[in-house]
Each structure stands twice: as C-alpha cells, then as structure tokens.
Image: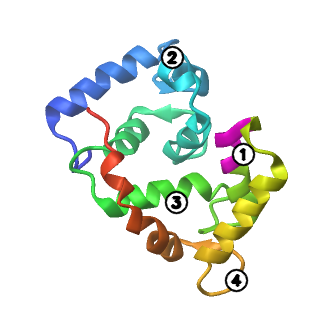
Amino acid sequence: MCKHLEGGEIRRLGKRFRKLDLDGSGSLRVDDFMSLPELQQNPLVRRIIDIFDTDGNGEIDFIEFIRGVSQFSVRGNQQQKLNFAFRVYDVDKDGFISNGELFQVLKAMVGSNLQDAALQQAVDKTILGADRDGDGRISFHEFCTIVGELDFTKKMVVDV
C-alpha cells in the first residue's frame, strides 16, 4: 500500500483512522479531524485535508489517509516532504504559487496578528526573492531552491 510504512504502522494507522471516523462511514471529513484538540487551532488543517483528498470528493478514505500520513514517516524522503509543503501553498493546484495564494495561506497562518498591508509587503518580497525566472510566481523548483536550504523537512515527521 505504501513503501514508507511497515505492516505494524499501517495497522496502528488503521486504528487511528477508525477512531477519527466518528460516523463509521469509512471516510474522514473536516469535522472528524477537527474533533482532535491538537488540530482545532491549526490554521492549515483544511489545506492539509485538501492535499490528502486526492480524488477531490471532500472526504479522505483510508488509502488517502495512509498515503498522506506516510509522507511524514521517518522513512519518507525529502522530495515528498518538499512536494507536500509546496502543495500547501499551491491552492489552485496549477503547479505554481502565486502572490494571491501565498497571501491567502500566510493570512490563515497569521490571522489578525499582522495587518494586511504588512503581510502583502512580506508576500511581495518573498515572491521577488524566490522568482528566479521573473514570471511573477514561484515554481516547485524555485520553492525547493529557497526552502530546501532551510532543512525543515527533518521536522516534518509524525510518529506512526
């Protein structure tokens, strides 16, 4: 099912999945995830769910759950983690992070702690600094060039 997980890990994730599946439907919705106190305050939980939901039906089945979580396994590779992080910002799934998308995701993260004008300045500066080909948006390659230097993928690990 997933090369980054072993049988015992898949069984444990199966138990977690069934616990989250509040209505026993065999799929998870946003409300199921939001039942976890540690996710209730996470401003990116909806983006993460959207990324896990590969068929776009608004729900996460067990296969999508396993594939999504496996990216955060200790054995998950850096490229997968970078791809996942990129997809958090690529809201319209066109393969690029636009100024508007970066603003939207960062706004969700900072809430009212930063005025929109200051946030927009930060977004503009980020786009200018990362946009190597001058097209006004950030490609996956450009994202990896900037973010890959930060080595944050080592922190993108979940104990399964």
Q: Main secondary structure of the magenta part?
A: helix
Instruction: Give the label on residue 107, or none.
Output: 1
Q: Which residue is mark 3?
A: 86
Q: Which residue is mark 2?
A: 37
Label 2 Cα neighbours within 10 Å, binned few <14 / some 14-19 / many ≥20: few
- In this picture, is 35 found above or below 142? above
- Helix or strand or loop: what does disc 4 sit on? loop
| Mark 2 secondary-structure assignment | helix
In the image, is 108 to the left or to the right of 6? right
Q: Amino acid at mark 4?
A: Asp
Q: Nearer the viewer, residue 77 or 59?
A: 77
Residue 110 falls inside the magenta stretch: yes
x and y percent of residue 72 in the render?
33, 44
Label 3, label 4: how many angstroms apart (C-alpha)?
A: 17 Å
Q: Residues within 10 Å of mark 3 (few under 14, many from 20)?
A: many
Circle nearer the N terminus (1, 2): 2
| SS category of the residue bearing label 3 | helix
